[in-house]
Image: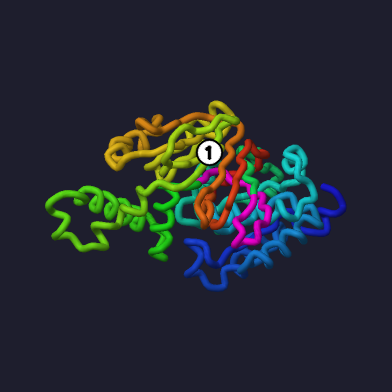
Amino acid sequence: MNNATQTHPPLGIITNPYAGKNASSSHRSKELQRIIGQYGLVKESRNIDQLKSILSEFAAHKVPYIVCDGGDGTIHWVINSYLEVLHTHKRDGIEAAMPIFVPTNGGTIDFLARKVGAHGGTFKILRRLKKHFAAGDLPQPTSLRTFMMEGKYTKEHQGKAYRKLAFSGALAGLAQKFFNKYYESHKPSLNTIIEVVTKTFTSTAFKGSWFEGYVPKDVANYSNEIFDPVGLEVRVDGKLVPFHRINTLNVGSIAIEIKNLIKLFAQADKDKKLHMHVGYLEPHEVFANLGNLFAGNPYSGKELVETTAEAIDIVSKEAEGLNPCLDGELFTGMATAKLSVGPQIRFLGIRGE
């Protein structure tokens, strides 16, 4: 360990008080500091400016491990804020400069924690981590491939350039609109997922039937927005997607599982590329693919392409632009997007005691 690192504990711990499982925990920072002791320094971040300031401090001291006390969204913001702190745009440079991140199952979905084998909550993980540091037997990290997403915002957002790293993206259409409905409830949970799916099924089932007149309008019309196509031009490795309408555009750089129920992007790990779905799915095709969604099998549809790619270029034809959901976080107003295979990020999966 170099001199810069010795002036600072080897663990930087960032706690997000708004994360799914943290909101009801008072005095959390003090308890986290008590558990980790001399091996870590706990910092609470309530906004992006605070987060960047904290990460600038960690980067200056070359802190080798950063614990993310939150869920997938917290990890997304920590990685991307650290990316802004770095002074390199090259993939190799990013991989070398990034610290090792420790997920803690503090969110609602926690697909990244599951992917790297993290078990238990933050308190249990920190206790185990402290023992590893004391014994000098830290496990080897796991590297996960990202995708780099670059482009410009719409004129309403001053046409500014952006650059983001992510692992999973519901970029447009069905899944993206599903997440919009999911977060509208302000109660993100497995029960909310079931509620949104149930309303979508009910709305679609009654649409056009003689039952429709007996169903409340808000229920009958619930699925309209979800299935409506969006105006996009999509190129996959330079080739234009030939469909005139698109209501499905999802991308993943790693295979993921959601709550032992949904399996996505299996081919990403095998091909070491971006696994994507793009095209149009009729309501009956969505329902027919539910078994594939749960089993992790390829989707089927008359106007659907499922493939792996090294580069995806997207131009939005909608005034509001692209409004993707990246790693569970919602973004708005992207006029263009170029996706490519990104740097690998290292994670430490700790089995809490």
Q: Which residue is at the far bottom?
A: 26
Q: Can you say whether 318 is above or below 91 in the image?
A: below
Residue nearest the observer in this picture, 241 or 102? 241
Q: Can residue 130 be seen in this snapshot?
A: no
Along the horizontal axis of the image, is 77 left or right of 56?
Answer: left
Q: Which residue is mark 1?
A: 234
Is residue 167 in the magenta section?
Answer: yes
Residue in view at x 77 percent, y 51 percent? 86
Residue in view at x 46 percent, y 37 percent? 278
Residue 116: x %, y % from top left: 55, 41
**Residue type for callout 1:** Val
Residue 282: x %, y % from top left: 32, 40
Which residues make up the magenta segment?
A: 152-170
Q: Can you say whether 15 is above or below 97 in the image?
A: below
Q: Can you say whether 304 is above or below 336 in the image?
A: above
Residue in view at x 14 percent, y 60 percent? 214
Residue in view at x 70 percent, y 59 percent? 40
User: Which structural element holds mark 1?
Assistant: strand
Q: Can residue 46 be seen in this snapshot?
A: yes
